[in-house]
Image (tube, helix red, strand yellow):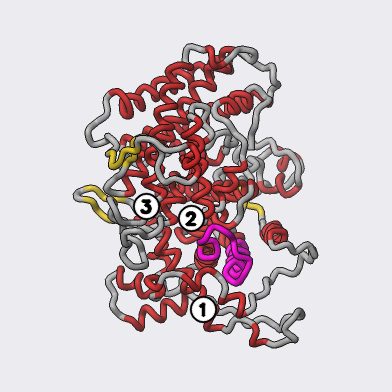
Amino acid sequence: MVNTGKPSGGCKLCKLRRIKCDEIKPFCMKCKKAKRDCPGYSDPFEAKIRDQTQATIRRFRKMRGDTTGAENRISLPQAPFAECLQTPFTTYKQATATSAMTVLHRRNGSNNSSSSNSSLDSLISTSSTSSASSHGDHGRDDQYIPFSIINHLEDRATSYFLSEFVLIPMREGNLPVRGYFPWVPKFMSKTQPAKVFLSAFRATSLASIATQHGKPVIGSALSAAQRHYLDAVRAMNQAIQDPTLAKSDETLAAVLLLALYETLVTSSQGSIKEYINHMKGAAMMVKLRGEQGLATQEGEAMFTTTRNHVLGFSCLPCAPEVSEFTWLLRHTCAREKDIAALNIANSAIRQDVDRVFRKARDAGHGNRHPRTAQRVLAILQSARALEARYRRLNDTHVPPQWASPVVEWVSSRPDADLDTCATAPGPVYGFETMAMGVIHLMTFVSHLMLTTSVLRCAAWLAGPDADWRAGDEYPDMAATAGRRVADLVALAPYFCRWNGRDHTRANFACGAEARAGDPLKRVAGQIVLWPLFAASVSDFAKDGERRFLQGRLRYLADVAGITQARTFLEMRVSSPSDDIERDRGTGYHW
């Protein structure tokens, strides 16, 4: 699924005839002059979606090393049974071997095992047995995975995904704590889940178990994940043609799962672009759904999930401007907390900065129109005011309930240990709940990116040949950015070893209770990935801090199986210096 941007404003007939429409309402004059009946205009918020099925097939074939180029050959072969036995899921802990749907029904208050089994049957695919292979096995059908084993693989993948990525909402005293992908169990427990959601879930859960040791396994799990991904793309293209299905909860849930899939499977910049494309589609769907999309708990949770992903993306250095995210960043729920509203306002400023400088670049590198300068100055004033609020919260007037608890202090470490050590010299933060850790994480990285916005505006106003480090804004912003990088370094160990135990309380949808010494849950690695990257490429990170942060990114890639971390390690970016050079028309951009 790919959203291709703002739809044309022309009437339906002019678009069909491929001519420029004068867009006069209610009926255009082009049609009237041609003595044609003008059919009117499309919904102005309608998303333009391009069918990416064939492009996805080609991408998968390239990743698998298949260069035959047969465009009409879309079925992926099943892996031999011996290969299935060698995949990493066979060593997965026994705690997650329990049927995922049985656990879901138990959490939903049902103890009816027959009901659980019937729901599980509807969850598992009915894959057909592959025809005999033409290579090596002399046409023996029994070399391929039997039907029951394929079902078992998908059941194990379901259990694994629910026990690693899905956190159920709970309450801490009087404070409700949101989960992570909490809407997945609700849709899975339906008697007949929507095809688009079920295919997307199967693809993502199989991808998660195929990459659980940090290296994609080109075998049964990944092949099945790719097959279900293609099914999900086809089902998505059908769903968006139906006005009702396009606004349904399960369609939006499927898009969010496909975005997660991209972060798990491939480690190239192409995966980031595919992720952005999916999130564009999700943002447009949220806009189409409007306030009605917040009527259910699942709808509100998916709105929050979508916007949190967009907020995280807006904190990435040198990230491209995405116009589809603008409405989402500026739309605030009535129940939003002050700190969340602060982070949303920061992302809106980042969007304004990106937009005004893009327009200036498009008009010519030497374009410094007075209206543009006035706009940049207005954004700078807003950014200064917001930065003052962040500084009061994080530095000068820290509320007692906001202060980050220090659970450990590391006096020193040899430089050689920074690549692999779990903690860096200095304080180590810890929190009672992951929710509090996430709020601090996003606030620290948002403040860091706000200093970048301030410096970008000041550098542009100073002129293309001026040294941006010599401006009046630089000393304060550099010191503030350095403190936020130090905060993110102190917070990294909490997420990189978070397993649902220790100083936290968690409620995963599946699996046994965490024990001391268990490895981190991959949901924590997914959440901390982008903030760690933003801190690691900051111009204000010290050499030891940068080395430690890059080591944590390598850990997320090699141990947590978040393969997108490898992409970030390969990117040579510095912020805000590259952002400023890009604003001047010469810097790096994706």
Q: From the image, tell me which residue sits under label 1.
A: 151
Q: Secondary structure at mark 1?
A: helix
Task: Describe the element under mark 3 as helix, strand or loop.
Answer: loop
State the SS at label 2: loop
Distance in Å between CA atoms under marks 3 and 1: 31 Å
Please report the bounds of the magenta region as a residue range.
Answer: 209-234
Q: What is the x, y in percent for residue 588? A: 65, 31
Residue furthest out toward the left = 173
Residue type highlighted by circle 3: Trp
- Distance, label 2 to label 1, CA atoms, is 25 Å
Q: Which residue position is annotated with label 3?
A: 498
Depicted 178 relative to depicted 114: above or below: above
What kind of residue is marked 2?
Answer: Ala
Q: Residue at x 35, y 35 (%)?
A: 411
The N terminus appears in which quarter of the rendering?
A: bottom right
**Predominant secondary structure, magenta span:** helix
- Tell whether 94 sits left or right of 460: left
Q: Position of residue 10 (x, y in %)?
A: 66, 41
Residue at 38%, 65% in the rendered image = 186
